[in-house]
Amino acid sequence: MSRRSGQRIGLGFDVHRLEPGRPCILGGVELPHATGPAGHSDGDAVLHAVIDALTGAAGLDDVGTLFPDTDPTWEGADSARLLGSVLERVHGAGYRVVNVDVVIATEGPRIAPHRAAMRARMAELLAVEVDAVNVKGKSLEGLGALAGGAGVAVEAICLLASGD
């Protein structure tokens, strides 16, 4: 693709059920918890939302199109690997990541004790400084279908800029 100019914003969203016995991988970090996100891959809803934010900003296909859950290739896949593939595509489209901001809503695992590790891991994966990645955990206050630790919902936003 040709080089682009300017900046673009992308928004990503993902939601996963939390199931007993699954590893609780969020933001590329395994959290100690009795339940983890269900999914065809490792279920990392945080990295999936970040992938969708990046692909949206770059005008690329979404995570489900790039890595369909009907393809056995992606069964149990490490979402960090998926993010790496997407980042290559983003760079190929002429963009670099400026920053990423993530909100994790769950009554499952507590996010606050793991924020720094998630920020560091995502910064490493995105090849940006840690202060270019933010993570916030939010309680659902006992409301909705994800209340009581039934699931995790994640919203991510990113800013891309043209150039290397």
Image (spheres, rainbow, N blue to C red):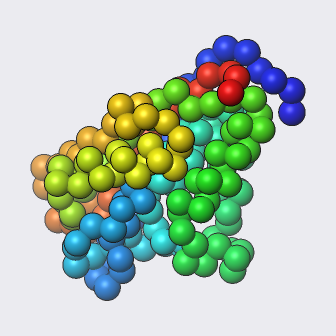
Q: Quick check: 91 left or right of 113?
A: right
Q: In the displayed orientation, state which residue is furthest to the bottom.
A: 21
* Depicted 150 relative to depicted 27: above or below: below
Q: In the displayed orientation, state which residue is furthest to the top.
A: 6
Q: Quadrant of residue 41?
A: bottom right
Residue 90 picture location, percent across and down: 69, 39
Q: Is residue 143 visible?
A: no
Query: Which residue appears at 32% of the width and 59% of the height?
Result: 152
* Image quarter hosting the N terminus: top right
Q: Is residue 120 visible?
A: yes
Residue 69 picture location, percent across and down: 63, 71
* Depicted 97 relative to depicted 89: above or below: above
* Depicted 137 relative to depicted 30: above or below: above
- Please give the count of numbered marks on the rendered protein: 0
Q: Quadrant of residue 55?
A: top right
Q: Quick check: 20 left or right of 81?
A: left
Query: Which residue appears at 53% of the width and 60% of the height?
Result: 80
Q: Quick check: 107 left or right of 14?
A: left
Q: Quick check: 55 left or right of 144?
A: right
Query: Which residue appears at 17% of the width and 65% of the height?
Result: 148
Give 41 or 69, whichever is nearer the viewer.
41
Q: In the displayed orientation, state which residue is furthest to the left.
A: 141
Query: Which residue appears at 51% of the width and 54% of the height?
Result: 48
Residue 64 picture location, percent across and down: 64, 58
* Image quarter hosting the C terminus: top right
* Depicted 11 relative to depicted 8: above or below: below
